[in-house]
Each structure stands twice: as structure tokens, then as C-alpha cells.
Amino acid sequence: MTSDHDVIIVGAGLAGGILAGVLAEGGRRVLLLDRGRSLAYSEIPGDHLRNHRLTLYGDHTTPDPAGHPRVFIDGAGVPHTVLPHDARYQLNAFTVGGGARVWGMQAWRFHPDDFRMATRYGVPDGSSLADWPIGYADLAPFYERAEHEIGVAGDHAGTTHAPRARDFPLPPVPRSPSAEWLARGADRLGWRTFTPPLAVNTRPYLGRGACIQCAQCIGFACPTDAKNGSHNTLLPRALASGRCTLVTRAHASRVLTDGSGQAIGVEYFAPTTTDSATLERRTARARTIIVSSGAIESARLLLLSASPLQPYGLGNHGDHLGRHVQGHAYPIAYGLLPPDVESSLLGPGVSVATTQFNHGNPGIIGGAMLANDFVKLPLIFWRQSLPPDTPRWGLANKRAMRDLFRRGIDVRGPVQEIPSPDSRVTLDPAVRDTFGLPVARLSGTTHPETVRTAEFMRARAEEWLRASGAERVWSWPAEKKFSAGQHQAGTCRMSADPRDGVTDPFGRVHGHDHLFVCDGSLHVTNGGFNPALTIMALAFRTAEHLLASP
Amino acid sequence: MSLSPSQLTALRSLLDRIIPADDFPGALAAGTDTYVLRHLLGDGSAGAHVLLLGFSQLDAETVARHGAHQTFATLLPPQQDALLADLAAARPMTFWPPPLAAAPWFHRLVELAHEGFYADPANGGNRDAASWGMLGYAPRTTPERAAP
Ligand SMILES: Cc1cc2nc3c(=O)[nH]c(=O)nc-3n(C[C@H](O)[C@H](O)[C@H](O)COP(=O)(O)OP(=O)(O)OC[C@H]3O[C@@H](n4cnc5c(N)ncnc54)[C@H](O)[C@@H]3O)c2cc1C
Ligand code: SF4
């Protein structure tokens, strides 16, 4: 069989762009498909009602939202057909670059113990907690590579939760006065803080300019292209190599397999001509297929690719495909700064963090990194951050906005979730997308241990604000709920033994020679950190593994 | 779908109680009615149609409390606020035909008003970034250097 491509990558998101860059520069001919478009900065406007921080009425990146619903099963078992702007949809950005086009840029290495949660804590009843088949040392060189080739700004000496061999390529983001105030509060508690790593050009780097500290960062595209992802680093490198063909508005519908069950290509829908609204069904063949569509859609695509030989979906021999869905419980403590300390309105905003509570909390499984929040938008502040007893309308509300907008502060952190096999992605039996394909059906809920850890971390977040001298502190209890969202992970977990997961430790689907998964799906556990740097490190590692394979 | 003149009057008076003017512009001065109207009339959804009926209901509530010679717009601000507080607490004095219900209707209008008032000016309810000026907020973005 001949083919124009050696590798087909489904998804030009954060991981897909890295795979394409490394493989194309390494001499492979790559076909890179993304259902979204390559969007210019001007196509992602500063719309405070439609962005990836507040999708009240949609967003400006999702192609054909109405044509791609999902089904959400609520706690009572009732199905709801939901569209992308609905929180229950668990949206990440569907555009070239993926979530990183509009992300908050926190670029964390996981803690070494994040890879061995079962060994460290045991397996709680009803959970599918397990160790990763690889450890921190396996990923460390690729974390380093991601930091340098994507561009991460950080405090090398202060970032101590995981061993580091080499400094960050960029100096840390500047500290705001309110972050200094939090750092002093932490000192009083004996907690160590530092400036967290962010994938942002704090000075010009890799041919692009520096961050101008604008005031609408997370959820939006960057005015100076200082927000680093694969869309402005590895993807341009892939295209410059002359060996990568990027097809946008190309929606993969199936991984094709041959009579022996091996993957041989991808079926997808793409416009008949570049600007056409009409989509046609196409197939492409290649020796290697990599599914990199985010944890929900990657699982869905493997489920949709069931064949007579693999009737439950590709890689589903052990009944793990689509299970163990994780995101992050995200406890938040809100407070008011004393009048003499102003919270800055400078982006990105996150500039103080502690990893004091990621592990070693008595009686608690795991924990979370805690940090201050991103630069805030007026409407989001009005919706979420006013003290709970503030009247919701009238002069009292308006005065509270005026008096407190500059004084609001919050501390929050991504709690390491305890995976549950019942939290899962399946194919909905009834609802179909615009192509007639069954949509993702999301069901299940958080393991109770996740709620316990989240409550513990909420108390730490409150404690931090109080010790810092916040005038008021408040927060809302954690609850059990299906969790995936922007940090979605876990649906194609890697395992050494084929019975324990979907892929091998390099992301190769068990039982398949040339079919790989590469995105958050692989995460056995999702760390007490924002997940993207780990996703990037895995992408570098899988790509290098492929280049080294005959 | 459209609003009757009396519904429009009621809507405007309502918005200026939800976000009143003080030293800084209120909802009307910031053009928030433009945003709310665009929302209510623009999408033509059944939900929006139901919301429109609420403005007539507002006048009915006024009559029930203050007599037939009054409309919501002619009440004094404290009287308007008292009436709205009743609605917010789900204590209407008239029958609200389902699916319309006093408290959810009022809360939805409170949401819509603040969406318009605090969102970016391009959404039509925050003319000249009036609310942002009050808060000292500005996005401070400059044009992109080079599109990737
Ligand atoms: C507002 C926001 C803030 C965030 N902040 C942070 C942060 O500070 N730190 C952090 O670590 N993470 C953050 N994240 C999460 C981060 O963006 C994701 O973890 C990351 O993008 C995941 O990379 P990925 O390659 O797995 O998937 P994605 O980046 O989601 O890419 C998947 C791609 O696949 C495409 N695709 C899906 N289905 C198909 C199909 N059938 N056919 C073809 N293409 C398909 C999609 O269009 C998409 O481009 C944030 C996300 C958002 C939205
Ligand atoms: S704060 Fe900096 S990185 Fe964030 S969008 Fe603005 S300029 Fe870009």
C-alpha cells in the first residue's frame, strides 16, 4: 500500500502540534487534521460574554456548535442534550492550537509522587486509582524540552516540588503587590511560596514579542502572541519543514482498520474546497495513526472505530476505554484585600503559588497546588466574586462593585482527583452529530475522596487569605459532580499490562502496532497541577519514540 | 416580536432601578437597554417571548399596589424598589401566567442588565466603557504584532 503520508495526527491541539513538529522535522510526512480552523487574533474578539472563561452565549472558536452536542447524564440519571457553551459539555477549545490558544499558561511539572498515587496512598474503595507505568524520571527530559521549545517563564530555584536539571528559558512573571501580600501571609504560616511557571514570553523569545500584561488574558487570544503553545512554536516548525500538511475543518469520524484489526488510516469529513460549507467524506492512509483530540473526543473516536474484530472500540479489550474520566476539583477561597493593598489589573495575574500541600497531608489522599488567580474581568467578578451577602441589584450592588472590584482576591488550586471507573465517556444511543455519528455521553461522578481532598484544600486556601490579613474570607463547599472540562484526562490510561489500560507506556494502543493516543487521555492520574505541561512532555516523548522506531 | 410602548417604558424604568445612576452612569445612560432589547428581540426564542410578558406584569403589579392611575414608570424610586424587592422574594400580588414567574423573571432581568452593563462595549450595553471607567478597568490590548 502506498500513501502520501507516514503519519496521520487527529487533532492539531497542544499535543498534536508538538507531535507534528517533532515528526516532520524528523523526516516523517505528516497529515495533521483538526476539526477547527486556524484563527487569527482578530477572529477571537475580546468578547466578555463569549470566551473560554465565560461561555455565557458561546465562544468564538467552536466550529458549528449546534451540530455537535453531547449528552450529559445528571445525578438522577436523566440525560440532557447539551451544547458547547453549557458547562456540562466540558468544553476545551476546538481550534488549531487547542486549549492553549486561549489558556492561562500555567506550565507545571507533576510531582514525582503524582505518578505513584496507588503505591503511596493505597487504592480507596470504589476507585480505580493506579500508578503510572512510567515515573517522573522518564518524563523529566521531556518536561525540560517542553519548557525550552514552547517557552516557559519560571523561578528555577523556587520551583522545588520536582527535581529540575536546567533553568527555565524565560525569567518569571512579575509579582503584583497583592501577590507579595499573599507571599508575606504564607511566610507567617511557615509555607514556602514562589512565582509559578507560566508559558509566556516575559521577554521576546523564539521570534515573538513579550507579554504586555493586558487585562484580558485567560480565555482570550493574546494581542502580542506571547501566549505560548504549539500553535506558535512546533506547528510553524512542522509547516516550515515542508513535510506537514495541515487540513482544518477536517473532522475525523473513524480510525480505519484492516482485516487483521490493525489501524491503516482515518476517515474524516472536510470541506470540498477551502472555503466551502459543503463537507465531503474522505479517507487517508498512513503507517502510523495518532489520536490527539482531547480526552473526551479521543475516547469517542476509538469507540466510533469499533469493528467486527474489536466490537467495543479500539483498545477496549480491558474495558478501560472512556473510563476513569478526570479533570480537577478546583476549590476557591475568596477574600477582600485591606484597603491599602490593591489587586493589580495586570495580566496574566497568577504570580504566587505554593506546593506545600500537594502531598503529605495527614489522612488525605494527594492534595493540590494553590495559587492566586488570573487578572479578572468585571462581569466575571460580578457573577462570582462579590461577598455572598451583597445585594444582587440596585445602588448597593453598584457601590459594592465600585468599592470591591479592586480589592477582591482569591486563591485556588487544582485538586488531584481520585479516579472512578464509573466516570466515563460512552457513545449516546440516541443523539447524533451533524455527520450522523453518535455523540459523547458523559456519566458518573467524582469519587468521595476527591471531595474530601477538595475540602481540605479549601480550608488551606481560606487559611492563607486569613493569615495574609484579608478583611473577609468566604468559599463554597466542594460537591460531587462529573469532572472533566478544560483539564480532561484519563479516558485511555496507559498501562504496562494490556489488561490494565488502553495504551502502553508510550501511548501505543495495546494490541496495535501503529495506533497511538497522545493527549490527556493517557494520564492515569491527573496530578495536583494544571495538566498541560505533562501533556506536552508526553507528546515530545511519544514523537521521539516514533522517530527511534524502525 | 416587539415590545409595546408601555412595555418599553417599564423595561427602561426597571433597568434604571437594577443599576441606578449615581456619581457614575446607570444602566440607561450606558445604553444597557440596547443590549437587553437586542437580547430579548434578537434571538426570537420562546424564552425571550415569555420574558417580554413580564413588563406588562410589572404594570399590573403596580396597579395592584398603587391603583389604576399608576404605572411602574410613574412610581417614585423607593416605591419601585419596594415592588421589585417583593418580586425578588417571590411575593407578587398578581397572578403571573405560567411559565412566567415573578422571582425567576426578575432575577433573569438582573442578570441581563449586568451582563450588558459590565461586558465589553461591543456588546451594546456598556457605552463608552462607562462601567469599566467606574471600576478602573480597561483591557489594554494593542493590535497583534503578527498573526501566526
Ligand atoms: C481557558 C483555558 C485555560 C486553560 N489554562 C490552562 C493552564 O493554565 N494550564 C494548563 O495546564 N492547562 C490549561 N488549560 C487546559 C489546556 O489547554 C489543555 O490541557 C490542553 O490544551 C490539552 O491539550 P490536548 O492536545 O490534549 O487537547 P486540545 O488542546 O484540546 O486539542 C485537541 C484538538 O483536537 C481537535 N479535535 C477534536 N476532535 C476532533 C476530530 N474528531 N477530528 C479532528 N480534530 C479533532 C480539536 O479541535 C482540538 O484542536 C486551559 C484551557 C482553557 C480552555
Ligand atoms: S496578559 Fe500577556 S500573555 Fe496574557 S493575553 Fe495579555 S499580553 Fe498576552
Image: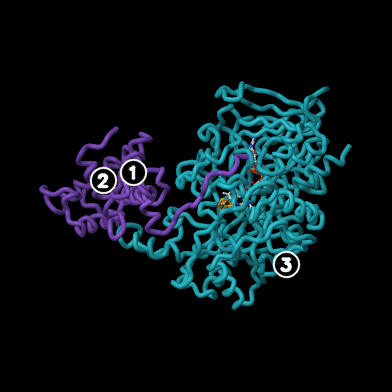
Chain colours: A cyan, B purple
Disc 3: host chain: A
Question: Which residue is at a point 56% across and 31% down the rendered structure image?
Answer: A432
Image quadrant where residue A437 sits: top right
Is residue B99 in sight in this rendering?
no
Q: Do the residues at pointers 3 and 2 share their chain? A: no
**Image height of A391 relative to A297, above or below:** below
Residue under mark 1: which chain is it in? B
Q: Nearer the viewer, residue B76 or B103?
A: B76
**What residue is at 27 percent from the left and 44 percent from the top?**
B54
Depth check, front residue: A326 or A381: A381
Q: Which type of secondary structure does the marked residue at label 1 adopt?
A: helix
As helix, strand or loop, the secondary structure at mark 2 comes to helix
Q: Which residue is mark 2?
A: B11
**Quarter-of-image position of residue B144:** top right
Q: Give the residue at mark 3.
A: A157
Query: Is disc 3's CB within 8 Å of ligand 1?
Result: no
In percent of width and height, residue A151 lies at 69, 52
Identify the chain of the residue marked 2, using the numbered disc in the image.
B
Three-letter residue code for mark 1: Val
The 10 Å Cα crowd at callout 2, few under 14, some 14 to 19, many 20 or more, is: many
| Disc nearest the viewer among 1 and 3 | 3
The amino acid on which the numbered mark 3 sits, given as a three-letter code, is: Ala
Residue beneath the point at 72% across and 58% down: A168
**Do dots 1 and 3 share one subunit?**
no
Q: Residue A192 versus residue A346: which sits nearer the camera?
A: A346
